[in-house]
Image (spheres, rainbow, N blue to C red):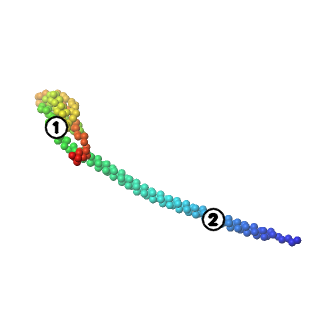
Amino acid sequence: MIRVNLLPHREEKRKARRQQFTVFAAAAAIAGIAVVLVVHLFNAGLISTQEERNRVFKDEITKLDKEIAEIKELRDRIDDLLARKKVIENLQANRADSVHLFNELVSATPTGVYLTSIKQNGLLIVLGGVAQSNARVASLMRQLDDSPFLTEPVLVETKAATVGGRRVSQFVLNVKIERAAQSTDEAAAKAKRG
């Protein structure tokens, strides 16, 4: 019987399989590295795109913040101008108050009463003067109360004094100016309708 040694043949096949396995393993490793690299590059691209979007958003937010600050500044200016306008309108509407006040005081002051001081603080008028008697002071207060322009006369102080050898009553009283309750806008609207 002839004996054939198949060991070298098997050894060559094993070697070939090992080489084939090594090639496939290297190819799989290269393919794995390539897949990881592609995924990394894809993720890096996504991150870069998102960072670009974020930068654009930050730039737009900065622009909007500046515009909001400008709008706030403009609103403050508008509020300031409206406040000034209101003050001017009040001054314009009430510019004749002093004329009305003096006319009312002249018509309301009875004989024997002399006003020595007039002070105004807003709508409050402080009158100081001398009268021949307390009855004349009371008459002045009634006349002021009957006035359509002046209201709520309140006697603050009255005392006896001597002026030029005569006994008189010195007095201080407060009276308020009564303004029309209508605003200038309502009056203008009525004037247009009427």
The reply to whether residue 89 is in sight is no
Q: Which residue is mark 1?
A: 104
Please determine whether, in this image, residue 51 is positioned above or below residue 115.
below
Q: Which residue is mark 2?
A: 31
Which residue type does callout 1 highlight? Glu
Work out which residue is located at the far bottom of the displayed protein and give it: 2
Q: Is residue 19 left or right of residue 37?
A: right
Q: Quadrant of residue 118?
A: top left
Residue 2, visible in the rendered structure? yes
> Residue at left 73%, top 67%?
17
Q: Earlier in the sequence, mark 1 or mark 2?
A: 2
Amino acid at pointer 2: Ala
Residue 38 image point, x, y percent: 58, 63
In the foreground, 157 or 98: 98
Asked if 4 appears above or below 67 in the picture, the reply is below
Mark 1 falls on what kind of element? helix
Q: Where in the figure is residue 3, as x and y percent of width and height?
A: 85, 71
**Secondary element type, mark 2:** helix
Question: Looking at the picture, how far across and down is residue 127, in whole percent?
Answer: 19, 35
Spatial CA distance of label 1 from label 2 is 107 Å
Q: Quadrant of the N terminus?
A: bottom right
Q: Residue at x 22, y 48 (%)?
A: 192
Q: In terms of image quadrants, where is residue 98? A: top left
